[in-house]
Image (cartoon, rainbow, N blue to C red):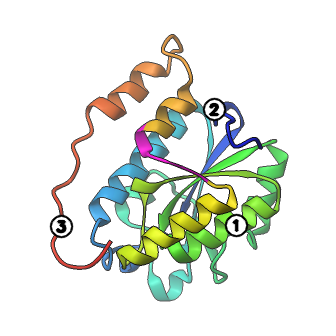
Amino acid sequence: MRLNERLSGRHGALLIVDMQEKLLAQMRYRDLIVANSARLVRGAQQLGLAVWATEQYPEGLGPTTAELAMLIPERAPKTTFHCCTIPQLVEQLYGRQIRHVTLAGVEAHVCVAQTALELLGLGFGVQVPADAVASRSKMDWEFALRRLEQAGVVLSTTEAVLFEWTERSDRPEFKAISELVKSFVPPPKQKGGHH
C-alpha cells in the first residue's frame, strides 16, 4: 500500500481490539474511545465493511463493554496480544480481498500496536484513529503511535476515517455517515487515570 493512498471503504475492514470493561475501566478516556469505536462500527456497517472484534483472555478480563457488544455480537477470544493468531480472522481478511484494516481499541501500546505490526508484516495497510485507541499511560499511547507511524501505519481520527471510507457525498449512505459525525457530542473529560 502506498503511504499516500486513500483508504476507501471498498477495500477496508474494521477491527475492534479488546474493548473489555475490565481494561477500559483503567483508561482515562474510556467514554471517548468507546463512543468513537461505536461510531466506527456503525459507519462500517452502514457502508458494508467487514467488522470484527476480539477479546483478550475473556475468562479473566470479561466480555466486551455492552455499548459495543450489542453492535458486534460475535467476538473472537485470544490469549496472544496481537490478533493475527486467530485463523478465521486472517482467512477472512485474505478471502474478502481486504487491503487495509482500521484498528480501534486498547491498549494502544500492547494489543493494538502488536496487531498493527503483524498486519503490516502480512502485507495489509493499517490505519489507526488516534481518538479511538487508548493506553493507561499517556506516554505509552504517544510512543505507540509514534512507533506505528514510523512503521508505516496511517494515523487518523474517527471523523476522517468515516469520510474517507464514504468517499462521496452523493452515495446513499452519506446521510447516515454525516449524521454520525454531526450528532456526536464528545463525552465530558473524565477525572483520574491516565490516557
Residue 93 on image: x %, y %: 77, 51
* Quarter containing the C terminus: bottom left
Q: Residue at x 56, y 23 (%)?
A: 167
Please rate how many residues cluster around mark 2, counting C-alpha atoms within 10 Å: few if below 14, some from 14 to 19, many from 20.
some
Q: CA distance from mark 3 to mark 1?
A: 30 Å
Residue nearest the viewer, comparing 179 with 121: 121
Three-letter amino acid code of the residue under disc 3: Gln
Q: Residue at x 34, y 33 (%)?
A: 181
Number of the front mark, 3 or 1: 1
> Could you tell me if the residues under marks 2 and 1 are in contact, i.e. CB atoms within 8 Å?
no
Q: Earlier in the sequence, mark 3 or mark 1?
A: 1
Disc 1 is placed on an element classified as helix
- Mark 2 = which residue? 8
* Residue 104 visible within the image: yes
- Mark 1 = which residue? 117
Above-or-below relation of 159 to 189:
above
Image-based side of 87 in relation to 149, left or right? right
